[in-house]
Amino acid sequence: GEIHAIVGENGAGKSTLIGIAAGTIPPDYAVVRMVGKEVKRPNAKKLRKVGMAVTFQHPELAEDLTVMENMQLAAPNLKGPEGRAEAKRLLSEVASEQHAMSLTTRVRDLTLAQHHVIELARALATKPQALLLDEPTAGINPTLINGLLDRLHRANTEFGITLFVIEHNMRVVMNLADNIYCLAHGELLAHGTPDEIQNDQRVIDAYLGAH
């Protein structure tokens, strides 16, 4: 039920962690446990079964398909009139007024910010217990980031979803996370509250000093 942030310099291991969790990178020997369950060779279907969803830095959407069709690709449960109503509700929950969109619009005609909205909405449509987000603010206009933070907070408080956010924007991290994990060279360097991490000399030397 909390919001966790994962930070670290390029090469720290954040993308590898995402890849292993999403099943795009097979671990050499690691055991992957999600929501208390061991998952061998993770993939989208297995993630849904254990209550985990993943969104990517570059939303993996089918550009020639409509918003609704993209929602159904990730959440096959969105069928018929009830499914359309649920998709519409989720999009309205996570989209700001300026990012509102029709279910029949083709994704190629939408902005990058709207792509991120679709990614988040379709992840929520799978009814996850936990959501792993890879740099959700990447490519987002800085003036729109506060709206994204509000949507993530809402996903946490209203849907009760645990969030794991991999993020370079330290303003976002400090304003969003309950706990922060700092990676360095593939290992966990430190973890703690935002205040603890900001004052941890190991983190300052390895990461925060560069920001």
Image (cartoon, rainbow, N blue to C red):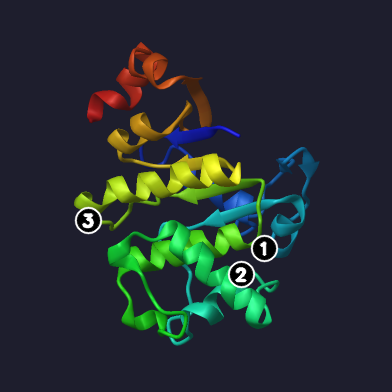
- Residue 163 drawn above or below residue 181: below
Quadrant where the C terminus lies? top left
Would you say the residues marked 1 and 2 are in contact, meaning their CB atoms lie under 8 Å apart?
A: yes
Q: Amino acid at mark 3?
A: Asn
1 sits left or right of 45 in the view:
left
Marks 1, 2: nearer the viewer: 2
The disc, 1 or 2, on the residue closer to the chain's N-terminal end is 1
- Residue 9 drawn above or below residue 120: above
Which residue is depicted at the point 51% across and 57% down?
A: 55
Query: Measured from the top left, where is residue 105 in percent x and y?
Result: 40, 84
Query: Measured from the top left, where is residue 117 in percent x and y?
Result: 42, 62
Dividing the picture into quadrants, the one containing residue 33 is top right
Regarding mark 3 in the picture, which secondary structure is present there?
loop
Query: Measured from the top left, where is residue 11 in percent x and y?
Result: 41, 41
As drawn, the label of residue 44 is 1
161 sits left or right of 114 in the view:
right
